[in-house]
Amino acid sequence: MAKNFKELSEPEILALAISLEETDGRIYSDFAEGLKADFPATSCIFKKMEAEEGQHRRFLIDEFRRRFGDHIPLIRREDVRGFVTHKPVWLVRPLGISTVRKQAEIMETETRRFYERAMQTVTDASTRKLLGDLAEAERGHEVLAGSIEEEHLTPDVKAEEERANRRLFVLQIVQPGLAGLMDGSVSTLAPVFAAAFATQNTHDAFLVGMAASVGAGISMGFAEALSDDGSMTGRGKPYLRGFICGLMTIAGGIGHTVPYLISDFHFATVVAVAVVIIELLAISFIRKRYMDTPFLAAAFQVIVGGILVFAAGILIGSA
């Protein structure tokens, strides 16, 4: 069972402090390793923070040995009530730079508050001084990080990190979303318009379109989620990619299906065709914006494919 902080003895307080510094140092090391490839300057910041946490730990161990001997009991953050449970973001690859900076800030604040509270509990003067010094050091970590940023994060480096962030956003969000939107917008054209022209009934066309959109969304979502786990490609969490891909597939199909809620067949078809044109132009814009594909080339590729599928649906439905 977890103990209340006020129940801890002085040896246990020092042992907990040692454990906190060791854990935080390991986390900063994982941050540095996870950021090394895409954000080398920020990785350097966390390497220096790891080194400082290691120095704090050595100070605490020396103080413990001076007062209580060589055996240091294992007391962890989770053994004491009141500590925040941190999500293990340091295990996620690739790491997000804003996420780790926020996590580091939370860790520093929590550790500083621990030292300030521990100072009020211990009676030994030298231990109280050490805890006070460490509290000040934790308070100064944010200032230290700022000074390191000034030293390492030059405008060129920041621009490179922004480009890396953009690459990660494209890999993890844009690519699966774009794949789903393209599949939903293009592949469902044939069944929707085939049903519309075969039955001349807007309700039937709407049901077929909804079934095709949802079915394609489920299929694309599972295919994307199971394609890879993101550990080697850097494409992020597979279930998030699958969800985005599936959702955008459904959205792409529903766009030109909703007009068939209009009872007039010919008017509904005109609106649906207009929606298809908007969808294809939107896909072309996204490809230009994030995939660096020239707009005319992207539009030609997407629109030609869309027209072929659209024509196939009309021909089959009219046969």
Image (cartoon, rainbow, N blue to C red):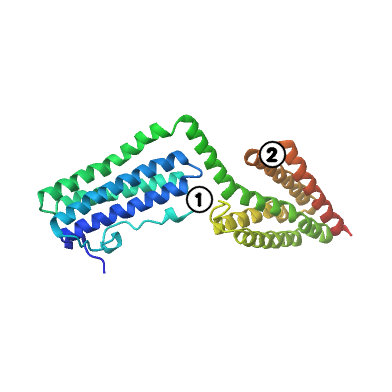
Q: Residue at x 47, y 30 (%)?
A: 155
Residue type at tag 1: Pro
According to the picture, the residue beneath numbered tag 1 turns out to be 94
Q: Is residue 4 above or below residue 114?
A: below
Give the mark nearer the N terminus: 1 vs 2: 1
Query: Which of the image's four quarters has the C terminus?
Result: bottom right
Check the image and name the residue furthest to the bottom: 1
Q: Nearer the viewer, mark 1 or mark 2?
A: 1
Q: Is residue 79 above or below residue 275?
A: below
Residue type at tag 2: Thr
Depth check, front residue: 310 or 206: 310
According to the picture, the residue beneath numbered tag 2 turns out to be 293
In the image, residue 53 lies at what x, y percent? 30, 48
User: In the rendered image, which quarter is residue 80 located in?
Assistant: bottom left
Q: Is residue 279 left or right of residue 77?
A: right
The alpha-carbon separation of the residues under discs 1 and 2 comes to: 25 Å
Depth check, front residue: 307 or 238: 238
Q: Residue at x 28, y 54 (%)?
A: 20
User: In the rendered image, which quarter is residue 254 located in?
Assistant: bottom right
Check the image and name the residue furthest to the right: 319
Q: Under tag 1, what secondary structure? A: loop
Q: Is residue 180 left or right of residue 38?
A: right
Mark 2: few/some/many CA within 10 Å (<14, 14-19, 20+): some
Q: Under tag 2, what secondary structure? A: loop
Q: Residue at x 47, y 41 (%)?
A: 40
